[in-house]
């Protein structure tokens, strides 16, 4: 079963995404900030990470960049999630090392396509 780590500080977003992805057959792990997300990436061995960019403790841009610099976890695909839909926000996430980008509120069919594309790389 494919394991997805959702790094999201908003409880409603975490709950909605985890329930919807569980129904689609994914195993879900959760983290509430970037630092906890990095720790979960190292200990939980997820197949993919959905990383909110506006996180407390350590933001998603920093957590993504640190993950991509760490040889133990740099191969884990990261999809950046943010409510900011400007092209500059997308570019900032990709520059940090994200493999893809999606906006919130999440369009589940589109996100599922991105998840599958990242997992198959």
Image (cartoon, rainbow, N blue to C red):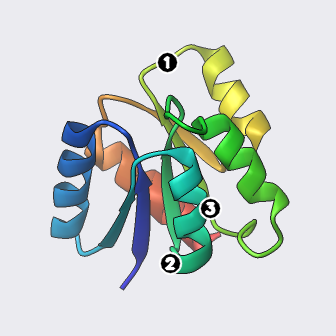
N-term mark: 1 or 3: 3
Is residue 118 depicted above or below 89 in this figure?
below
Q: Quadrant of residue 42?
A: bottom right
Is residue 51 depicted above or below 29 in this figure?
above
* Residue, disc 1: 85
* Residue, disc 3: 77
Q: Is disc 1 in contact with disc 3, using a CB cutoff of under 8 Å? A: no
Q: Secondary structure at mark 2?
A: helix
Q: Secondary structure at mark 1?
A: loop
Question: Is residue 73 among the parts visible in the rendering?
Answer: yes
N-term mark: 3 or 2: 2
Instruction: Name the residue rendered at 68%, 16% in the picture.
Output: 88
2 vs 1, front mark? 2
Q: Residue furthest bottom?
A: 1
* Residue, disc 2: 44
Question: Is residue 45 among the parts visible in the rendering?
Answer: no
N-term mark: 2 or 1: 2
CA separation, marks 3 and 2? 14 Å
The image shows residue 12 at horizontal and vertical percentages of: 19, 39
CA separation, marks 2 and 1? 30 Å
Q: Quadrant of residue 69?
A: bottom right
3 vs 2, front mark? 2
Q: Secondary structure at mark 3?
A: loop
Instruction: Name the residue rendered at 18%, 47% in the picture.
Output: 16
Instruction: Name the residue rendered at 23%, 41% in the picture.
Output: 11
How many residues crowd around disc 1 within 10 Å: few (fewer than 14), some, or many (20 or more)? Answer: few
Instruction: Name the residue rendered at 59%, 54% in the picture.
Output: 78
Q: Residue furthest front?
A: 57
């Amino acid at each position: 079963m494919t394991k997805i780590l959702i790094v999201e500080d908003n409880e409603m977003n975490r709950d909605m995404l985890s329930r919807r992805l569980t129904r689609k057959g994914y195993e879900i792990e959760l983290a509430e900030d970037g630092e906890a997300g990095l720790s979960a990436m190292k200990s939980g061995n997820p197949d993919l990470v959905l990383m909110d960019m506006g996180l407390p403790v350590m933001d998603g841009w920093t957590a993504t960049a640190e993950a991509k610099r760490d040889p133990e976890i740099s191969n884990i695909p990261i999809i950046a999630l943010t409510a900011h839909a400007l092209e500059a926000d997308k570019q900032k996430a990709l520059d940090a090392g994200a493999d893809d980008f999606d906006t919130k509120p999440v369009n589940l069919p589109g996100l599922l396509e991105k998840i599958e594309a990242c997992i198959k790389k």
